[in-house]
Amino acid sequence: MTEQLAQAAIGVDIGGSGIKGSIVNTATGELISEEFRIATPDNAAPDVIGDIVRQVVEHFEMSEDTPVGVTFPAPIINGVCPIVANLNQDFVGMNVAELLTQHVGRPIVVLNDADAAGLGEAEFGAANGQEGTTIVLTLGTGIGSALVRDGMLVPNTEMGHLLLPNGLEAEKWAASSIRTKENLSLEQWAIRLQDVLDMVELLFSPDTLILGGGISTRFAEFAGFLSTRADLEPARLFNTAGIAGAALVAAQEA
C-alpha cells in the first residue's frame, strides 16, 4: 500500500448525474480507494460544482501535494470551457481549472471527460498497445469521444454532436440516457447506436472502436446487434476510465 500511495493521484469525474472520485495508482490505473460520489444538482452554478469537487477531494484526506485531475463534460482548451451542453451555461468562457483550484485550494488539472476516459483506456485498458486510430465513445448522459492515434490523444473531438442523416445530433438520438428516457430495449437502442457508429466510421475510419460508460458493462447483451468494420470492444475500465485518465494526467503534469 505504501508503494501505491507513493504513485497516487486523485481523479474526479464531473458527470451530469453525479460527481465522483477515487484515489488512483497511476502506475496501474487501479482505484485504491472506494469511490466517493455526490449527486450533481440540476443546472448547478459553477461555484456549487466547485464546492462539490472540494468535498470529494477532501473526503480522501490525502496530503496537499497529491496531484488532482478532474474531468469536465465539455471541451477544455487551456483550462477554458468554450461551449457546454449538459451543465450550467455560466461555464461558457470560464477557466474551469482556475475555478476549481480556487475552491479546492490546490492546483487542479482539468480535461474533457471523454478525453480522460480515452487516455485511461489507452494507458491501462482496451486501447493499450493498439496501433493506428482508436476511438473511445463514452455513452452516458450524452456521448463523449476520444480519438487516440498510436497512443497520442487528439483532444476535444466532440463526436456526440455529429449530425446524423435523420437530422439529430448523435447524443440526442443514442445516448444511454435516451435509452432510459424513452424506455428503449437494448436492441432498439443498439439500432440507434449503429447510426452513430456508421457516421463515426465514415468520417474517421478508425481501426478500433471502444464503447465506454456505465452501459459498457452490458456490452455482451447488445454487441450482437452492432456491425462495424473496425474492431469493436467494450472499455475494460468501464465507467472508471475517466477517473484513471484524469489522475494520470495530473500526475504527469505534477
Image (spheres, helix red, strand yellow):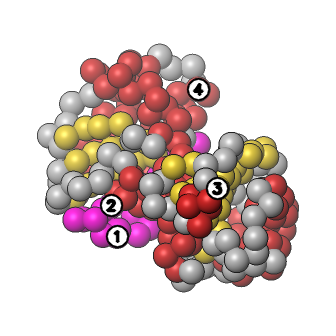
Measure how far apart labels 3 and 1 are at the Cα level.
26 Å
Identify the residue at horizontal 36%, vertical 36% (top origin): 234
Tell which tag, 2 or 3, sits nearer the viewer: 3
Q: Write down the residue under mark 2.
A: 147
Mark 1, Cα crowd under 10 Å, few <14 / some 14-19 / many 20+, is: few
Taking the magenta stretch, the answer to whether it contains residue 103 is no
Q: Do callouts 2 and 3 mark residues in contact (Cβ within 8 Å)?
A: no
User: Of 182 and 45, which appears nearest the observer?
Assistant: 45
Q: Write down the residue under mark 3.
A: 23
Mark 2, Cα crowd under 10 Å, few <14 / some 14-19 / many 20+, is: many
Q: Do callouts 1 and 4 mark residues in contact (Cβ within 8 Å)?
A: no
Region in magenta: 141-159
Question: Amino acid under label 1?
Answer: Val
In the rendered structure, the answer to whether residue 45 lies left or right of residue 139 reads right
In the rendered structure, the answer to whether residue 63 lies left or right of residue 23 reads right
Circle 1 — which element?
Answer: strand
* Residue 139 visible in the current orientation: no
Residue 112 tag number: none
Measure how far apart labels 3 and 4 are at the Cα level.
30 Å
